[in-house]
Amino acid sequence: MTPWSRRRFLQTSLAAAGAGVLGGLACRRPAAIESGTHGARLDRLLRRYVESDTLPGAAASIGLATEPAHFLSAGTIARDSDDLVTPDSLFRIMSMSKPITGIAVMMLIEDGAIGLDQLLADFVPGFARARVLSDPANALTSRPARTPITIRHLLTHTSGLGYFSRIDGPLRDAYIELGLLPVRTGGQSLPNVPPFTYAPNLKAFADRLATLPLLADPGTRWIYSMSPDLLGRVIEVASGTSFEAFLQARLFAPLGMTSTFFTVPKSEAHRLTSLYTLREGRAKVLTDPGPTSICLDPPPFPFGGAGLIASPRDYDRFLRMLAGEGATLGTRILRRPTARLAMSNLLPPDVDMRGALVSSQGFGALGSVALRTQPNGKGPGTFGWSGGAGTTAFVDPARGLRVAGYAQYIPARELPFRDAIVEAVRAGA
């Protein structure tokens, strides 16, 4: 059996395993759950944040299984605006871009253009000689990696790659020097980041990243990383088209996601919310005004990890497809086994999860996966992720729910808004 045949065999076997993990959950009817009841809780939550002057505006959505969503909103798109937040307002969803990138990879896995356990070096040859830091604190001294990076590693943040804002020392300095910062700065300096020039495109980003050592051997540790951005380049090579064009043709257009952008058209600027920095517990300091936002200009390359801007109505179309296990409103973009696989636990065995940004102890195609009922009420099989500007979204097949919340403030962790969205729909609350 050839290496590629073995990969294809493993891919097929895992699809069956993924179906076993989630099988029977997505089709269960919600037990004692009423969208109206949960909608009322979400509505009170949004109004409380706005009426307390904590946020200028916020939005949320909730849907039962694959039924139409109930959209809620409160306040305005900016403190100096009279325009109300609506389901069609535009929000910087940041890391909620990740599951979209993950599903795009799964589409190509289904096509046979990518193998789940295929080597990254098949798409970015520079990673054929991956090395691992020997002494992260002192220098970029390194040793050969014990195992090569695979697509599975990239999808589950177990590749050994890092993220510039979460590491220190010479490697962080090298990330900055090479322009490996896949996040918009709005022309403002990031904390403790000297002036830098972005990598000009995804190919340059991937090739430059391949010259730097890893933080750990692939498959051994969960480390929040730039792997979603690197997967954008993998998608380009595997599909023969640009990452942005692939998303538009294979995901956004079929799902009717007409308000999801890497670059917001000037004609839509009136819908774009303003981004604020927290001051004394309130979103007060204007950081990126909607009418003149950096999001109106093309990024140096499409950031698969944090680059998308979307409306609540659009993102719900994506969630509804996940809840429908690859299909919604008669449109199927993934076969059911592939969708189940994407939302199942894809972590390599015996991964060190200490320090991981997940409580669920499971991880799928660039989203967390609950392996059991969580303390916050999320049921087993819940799949989703949150964004660094105050957004969160998930599908909970065990409870027949899909939920999202939207605000625009940084740093997101300093307000409990995202957690409060989850708590508002806790079972039996």
Image (spheres, grey):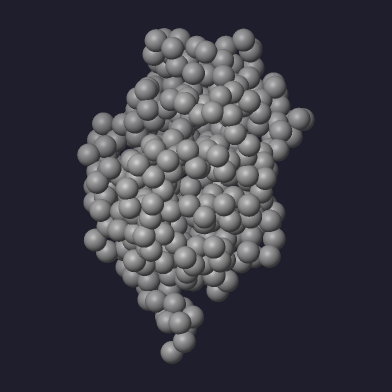
Q: Where does the C terminus fall, quadrant-wise?
A: top left
User: Would residue 148 be visible to someone looking at this image?
Assistant: yes
For the point 42% across and 41% down, the residue is 170
Vertical placement of residue 420 versus 331, above or below:
above
From where the camera sits, is residue 87 visible?
Answer: no
Quick one: 416 or 89, which is closer to the camera?
Answer: 416
User: Nearest the camera: 286 or 197?
Assistant: 197
Closest to the observer: 403 or 189? 189
Tell me which residue sits at (30%, 44%) in the image. Answer: 356
On the rendered structure, is 96 left or right of 235?
left
Res. 6 image quadrant? bottom left
Percent coordinates x, y for residue 295 in the rendering: 65, 31
Measured from the top left, where is residue 187 in percent x and y? Answer: 63, 25
Q: In the image, is residue 360 above or below residue 408?
A: below
Q: Is residue 1 left or right of residue 296?
A: left
Q: Residue at x 71, y 27 (%)?
A: 269
Height in image: 79 above or below 169?
above
Q: Is residue 176 above or below residue 2?
A: above
